[in-house]
Image (spheres, grey):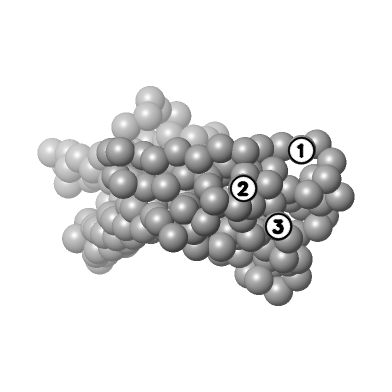
Amino acid sequence: MSRRTKSLLLLAVVALLVNLPIAHSTWTGWRVDRDGEDVRATVTGTQLVADDGGYLVEFQMPEDIDPDESVWVAQVDRATYDEAIASAQIGVRVLRDDPSAYTVEGQVTSRVGLVVMGLVDLLLILAAVLLWRGRGRAGHALVLRATADVERTRPGPGIEKQHDGQYVVSGDVVSLEADRIVLDVEGREVTVLLEGHRNPVGYQQPARATGHLVG
């Protein structure tokens, strides 16, 4: 596997981690809408958040829904906040087998998380496009006809032309066959035709090959 492929896979993993919370929240909301039960929860506290003008309501579910009597919190609009203070109750739709999955009457959801996620996704897409286009800029695949045994070397890809017209290429082994190996050399795939020469280097290990370029 080349470094570029690894980088693309890493970007995919990061994108998955970034989007997973939103995906989980969306899935939970859909389940609550479909299978939730409407109940009246007991208000245990209220708070006005001065910084952003938000209204927070703390509440407990009915005991048959949440035997642990946990305290939950939601940000709501002003009308729901006032009603919660006046009646000491608030309407909640909740999954009976999962009290942590709920929606509240008049609930206000912040779009900051969606905006941030969208910006991160955009940056990840841009990085992936640059990596992919970089493959084209690195040049076409090369073929080297070996004139000596392949050697183990220190990590560090490169292509160097010798005075006798031969090339020395160094890179990680990304493919192994009986008569050839493929190296990842600075994002460019170089196929080394062994021509009977030995290759003692294993898969994904750095190797150095000497020979003439074909074509």
Mark 1 and mark 3 in contact (Cβ < 8 Å)?
no
Residue flagged by tag 1: what amino acid is it?
Glu
Q: Is residue 76 above or below residue 203?
A: below
At 80% from the left and 36% from the top, the residue drawn is 68
Q: Which residue is mark 2?
A: 88
Q: Look at 45% across and 38% down and name the residue there.
A: 47
Image coordinates of residue 66 in percent, x first then y, are 80, 45
Does the CB distance between marks 3 and 2 fall below 8 Å? no
How many residues crowd around disc 1 within 10 Å: few (fewer than 14), some, or many (20 or more)?
some
Residue occupying image coordinates x 67% and y 63%:
93
Q: Residue furthest top?
A: 154
| Furthest residue in direction left, as rendered | 163
Q: Residues within 10 Å of mark 3 (few under 14, many from 20)?
A: some
- Residue under label 3, please give it: 40
Mark 3 to mark 1: distance in Å? 14 Å
Tag nearer the camera, 2 or 1: 2
On the question of residue 8 being in view, the answer is: no
**Residue 171 locus on image (x, y percent):** 37, 40
Looking at the image, tell me whether mark 2 or mark 1 is earlier in sequence order: 1
Precedes in sequence: disc 3 or disc 1: 3
186 or 196: nearer the viewer: 186
Dot 1 falls on a residue whose secondary structure is loop
The residue at which mark 1 appears reads as 69
Mark 3 → mark 2, Cα distance in angstroms: 10 Å
Q: Is residue 81 visible?
A: yes
Quadrant in the picture for residue 108: bottom left
Q: Position of residue 109 (x, y in %)?
A: 44, 57
* 72 lies left or right of 158: right
SS state under label 3: strand
- Distance from Cα at disc 2 to Cα at disc 1: 16 Å
Q: Amino acid at mark 2?
A: Ala
Position of residue 90 in the picture relative to residue 194 (left or right): right
